[in-house]
Amino acid sequence: MNKVHQKFSGKFSSHWVKVKFYQEKPKDDAKRLKDVRFCEATRKAILGPILLDKESITCPGAQHVFGWKSLFKNESLQGCCDKQDMREKTLKSMVSRVPFFKKPFKYIGLNTDGVPDLVMSYIPPQEVMSLIKIYNNKKGGNLDVSLCAIMAVCGCVAVKAYLEEKICLSFGCDDSRKFADMRRENLAVGIPKKLFKIFLD
């Protein structure tokens, strides 16, 4: 399972990235990035292993969902309101529904060694359909999806897939569309470790 992202890439014709959460700094030679968004870092990880921590991430939304700095406790919420052209009450309601780590991890590895906690990718609808068909056939049920246009990749895909152990889909947010090279024809998909065998057997 160490090369699980490569197996997904081969089967679904797109780049997949391993995501692993750590409390201790891993010993591999991953490149530590600075001043990036989480979604942006997932694209950079295609070129090699990456390590992120609290100081790496510039996006207030990602800081919030990874449990490092709450949007409700600093001036970032007002900045998000202005950026989203949204009332504070509405934004607070939406943010409160996005999953976040109550006990934060210290590091996030992208394509680092070992079995990941989840894999994720940006793929076209036809590939999403193939994933869902496999899921339907193996699990014998429908896939329920909740969509949000804020913290879409970091919170609604990465954190949610980890915490809820289910497939998560997102159409992205303004930042992920811009900084992660999430093309207009793609969706973001996250698959937790618990479900790997469903797609790779």
Image: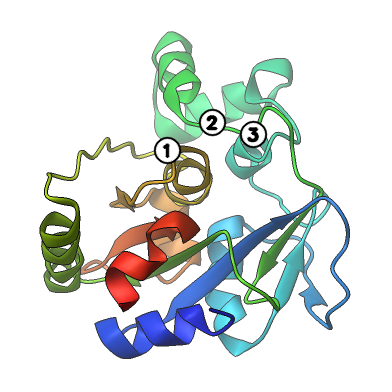
Q: For this view, does 59 lie left or right of residue 161?
A: right
Q: Give the foreground label among 1 and 3.
A: 3
Check the image and report above or below for 6 versus 130: below
The kind of residue tagged 3 is Phe
The kind of residue tagged 1 is Ile
Residue in the image at 88% along x and 56% along y: 24
Quick one: 169 or 163, which is closer to the camera?
163
Residue in the image at 35% along x and 52% along y: 172
Q: CA distance from mark 1 to mark 3?
A: 16 Å
CA neighbours of label 2 inside 10 A, class few (<14), some (14 to 19), many (20+): some
Quick one: 139 or 161, which is closer to the camera?
139
Which quarter of the picture shows residue 15? bottom left
Check the image and report above or below for 59 versus 49: above
Q: Going from the N terminus, do you reach mark 1 or mark 2 first?
A: 2
Which residue does the numbered mark 1 point to in the structure image? 150
Check the image and report above or below for 167 versus 200: above
Q: For this view, does 113 lie left or right of residue 160?
A: right
The kind of residue tagged 2 is Cys
For the residues bearing labels 2 and 3, Cβ distance under 8 angstroms:
no
Q: How far from the left and from the top, in percent, is residue 111?
A: 62, 76
CA neighbours of label 1 inside 10 A, class few (<14), some (14 to 19), many (20+): many
Checking the image for residue 80, the label placed there is: 2
